[in-house]
Amino acid sequence: DTEVTQTPKHLVMGMTNKKSLKCEQHMGHRAMYWYKQKAKKPPELMFVYSYEKLSINESVPSRFSPECPNSSLLNLHLHALQPEDSALYLCASSQEYTSGVSTDTQYFGPGTRLTVL
Amino acid sequence: AQTVTQSQPEMSVQEAETVTLSCTYDTSESDYYLFWYKQPPSRQMILVIRQEAYKQQNATENRFSVNFQKAAKSFSLKISDSQLGDAAMYFCAYRSPQGGSEKLVFGKGTKLTVNP
């Protein structure tokens, strides 16, 4: 089973709202990722969690706040977003890496289509 | 830094025929991973095929196969017996095996249309 689930599928929010995106996987993967994808563009990495600790933050604005409550869950908290933040937000996971060697394949969820009004 | 180039923004193929999508990359590493992902209009990124650079044998998955030319830094995807369901955006991606470098470097994508 290589399933990554994301909720909600669609989200519309105002610039003053606070909302959260959720991602879940039950493959025993210990690395989880958030990507942002604009139309007709490749995904852009936002955050990487490894063993539930933030390992990469690609200089993402603080209005995006990731959280990894446990090894299966990844949240992205949204606050005071701008219209230009409207995009498809993809979650992915991969097996942990040990001894400095990264296991490689990332499996993606279906994404959350976010619209900021 | 590694870069991935997909020189064909759009391609089309007749159903049941074969099409090849091109991908080139630039890296100074000797070991790495390469991937092709498919993203249909439903938008989920689906892994099509992966290749480890240390393997000389080209990866195959059913109707999908790659032509991996390490010296030329080329990684093309061949789709045989094309089906309507193959219509999608295809992204080529590179990943370093080094710990702390989990970032996938994507190409800009190739939009594949399958004509009935």
Image (tube, rainbow, N blue to C red):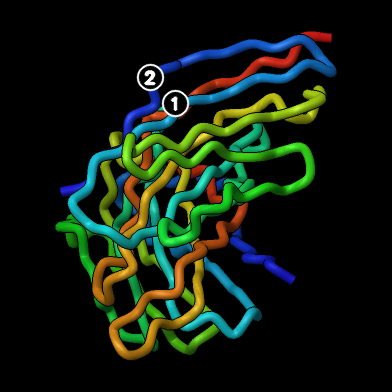
Q: Few, some or many C-alpha atoms within 10 Å of disc 1 (few <14, some 14-19, many ≥20)?
A: few
Chain under label 1?
A
Amino acid type, mark 2? Ser
Q: Identify the element where label 1 is drawn.
A: loop
Left or right of A21? Residue B4 is left
Decide which of B22, A9 is in the foreground and name it: B22
Q: Taking the image as drawn, is residue A24 in sight?
A: yes
Decide which of A30, B105 is in the foreground and name it: B105
Q: Taking the image as drawn, is residue A14 in sight?
A: no
A86 lies above or below B101 = above
Q: What residue would you read off at disc 2?
A: B7
* Residue A51 found in image quarter: bottom left
- Residue B37 percent across, percent down from the top left: 55, 44
Using the rendered image, report if marks 1 and 2 lie on a common chain: no
Q: Give the residue at x 78% y 24%.
A: B82
- Looking at the rendered structure, the number of numbered marks drawn on it comes to 2
Decide which of B37, B62 is in the foreground and name it: B62
- Residue B38 percent across, percent down from the top left: 60, 39
Amino acid type, mark 1? Lys
Chain under label 2?
B
Q: What residue would you read off at disc 1?
A: A40
B71 lies above or below A30 = above
Q: Identify the element where label 2 is drawn.
A: loop
Give the CA distance from mark 1 to mark 2: 15 Å
- Residue A109 percent across, percent down from the top left: 59, 57
